Image (cartoon, rainbow, N blue to C red):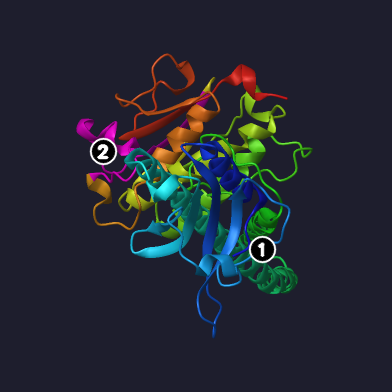
């Protein structure tokens, strides 16, 4: 077991805190060690008081083979697993150990066993993480070539299509999606780099790759364009009506601060739900207001009883009972909206109030992503 420096320091502090107490003269902690093909041994990992000498195993210390009334051994045990032992030496005459001392030493041994257990768990998790990182690197390496090949074949196909503009447009959209997958690859490639976990972001995150280049100019419009293209293609494929903005307000085309790139993730999530849970021939679309974005569908209406429940993690509404899903999409979308100072809600009425431009928007389900417009822009 390769012990971390922090673990060794913690053990020493625990032993020091007990030292010079009730006749105790020496505390030594050993960890169980067993290499394949050899018998188990106990290796010294810490002692009080500290002595400048090599740490030896119990088997290599002849003095320990002779019993002494002034010495006791306390097991460091986690459930039925013996992790190590604590050796205690005292100057008590006749080996008369007070019950209070024995009780305190038992508590110390339990505490030390917990420390060892946590350290072992940490090391196992690190091994798992390193293994997964290596696997991700292999997958990224393997995916790069076929992704590049898809782009090459798509360009060759465009040349062969000649003047068939409708078909060329479909192939060009395939190239856009290929670029999007490349962005995923770039974000995965960053896993091996030191990362700082974002505050209040759940483990479910990464529906879309992050904005990897903070120097790149982005706008709400540029973020939503590829999502709308994908929505239009899905609508054509599923024979659903599709509606998208024809005019974009000033706030959607002004440079955006990088942290607000999650707007795209929220919208993509809502549109994915709309397509998944709406019936055939229903209308799906997106509209822009003066201070937010509406994602709507004309499918099965979400009931009043489910209006807030659908934002709970793991909850699945009546429209989703026969569909695949995990029940985290709307939970995550609202969480991200609040993180950037916005709000996501299902409108209670079938229209948007106080918005002259969209007052006639009447759909069965309208999700309204309200945004802090004044804070968005760089």
> Badge 2 is on which residue?
301
Give the CA distance from mark 1 to mark 2: 37 Å
On screen, residue 53 above or below 259: below
Residue 124 position, x and y percent, is: 53, 62
Image quarter (top left, top right, bottom left or bottom right) of the C terminus:
top right
Residue 269 position, x and y percent, is: 46, 45
Q: Secondary structure at mark 1?
A: helix
Relative depth, front residue between 23 and 77: 23
> Badge 1 is on which residue?
168
Which quadrant holds residue 188? Answer: bottom right
Relative depth, front residue between 376 and 38: 38
Q: Residue furthest front?
A: 94
Relative depth, front residue between 234 and 340: 340
Question: Residue 107, can we see it?
Answer: yes
Q: Secondary structure at mark 2?
A: loop
Residue 295: say if magenta.
yes
What label does residue 277 carry, if any?
none
Q: Nearer the viewer, mark 1 or mark 2?
A: 2
On screen, residue 23 above or below 186: above
| Residue at 39% from the left image edge and 22% from the top image edge | 352
Question: Residue 274, can we see it?
Answer: no
| Residue at 30% from the left image edge and 44% from the top image edge | 299
Which quadrant holds residue 168? Answer: bottom right
Residues rendered magenta in the picture: 292-317
Position of residue 129 in the picture relative to residue 234 (left or right):
right
């Amino acid at each position: 077991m390769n012990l971390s420096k922090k673990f060794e320091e913690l053990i020493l502090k625990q032993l020091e805190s007990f030292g010079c107490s009730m006749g105790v003269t020496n505390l030594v902690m050993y960890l169980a060690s067993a290499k394949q093909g050899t018998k188990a041994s106990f290796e010294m990992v810490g002692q009080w008081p500290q002595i400048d000498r090599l740490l030896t195993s119990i088997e290599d210390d002849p003095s320990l083979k002779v019993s002494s009334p002034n010495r006791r051994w306390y097991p460091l045990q986690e459930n039925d697993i013996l992790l190590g032992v604590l050796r205690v030496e005292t100057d008590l005459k006749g080996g008369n150990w007070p019950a209070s001392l024995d009780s305190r030493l038992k508590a110390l041994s339990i505490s030390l066993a917990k420390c060892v257990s946590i350290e072992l768990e940490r090391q196992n998790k690190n091994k798992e993480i390193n293994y997964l990182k290596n696997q991700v690197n292999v997958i990224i390496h393997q995916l790069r070539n076929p992704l590049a090949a898809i782009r090459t074949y798509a360009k060759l196909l465009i040349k062969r299509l000649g003047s068939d503009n409708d078909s060329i447009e479909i192939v060009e959209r395939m190239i856009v999606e290929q670029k999007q997958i490349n962005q995923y690859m770039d974000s995965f490639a960053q896993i091996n780099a030191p990362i700082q976990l974002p505050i209040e972001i759940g483990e479910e995150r990464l529906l879309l790759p992050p904005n990897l280049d903070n120097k790149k100019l982005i706008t709400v419009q540029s973020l939503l364009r590829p999502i709308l293209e994908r929505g239009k293609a899905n609508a054509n494929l599923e024979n659903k009506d599709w509606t998208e903005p024809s005019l974009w307000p000033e706030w959607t085309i002004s440079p955006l601060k990088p942290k607000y790139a999650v707007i795209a993730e929220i919208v993509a999530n809502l549109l994915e739900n709309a397509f998944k849970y709406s019936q055939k021939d229903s209308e799906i679309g997106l509209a822009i207001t003066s201070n937010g974005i509406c994602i709507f569908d004309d499918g099965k209406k979400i009931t009043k009883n489910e209006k807030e429940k659908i934002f709970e993690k793991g909850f699945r509404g009546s429209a989703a009972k026969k569909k695949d899903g995990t029940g985290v999409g709307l939970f995550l979308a609202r969480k991200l909206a609040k993180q950037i100072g916005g709000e996501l809600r299902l409108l209670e009425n079938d229209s948007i109030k106080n918005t002259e431009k969209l007052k006639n928007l009447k759909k069965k389900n309208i999700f309204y992503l309200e945004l802090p417009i004044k804070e968005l822009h760089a």
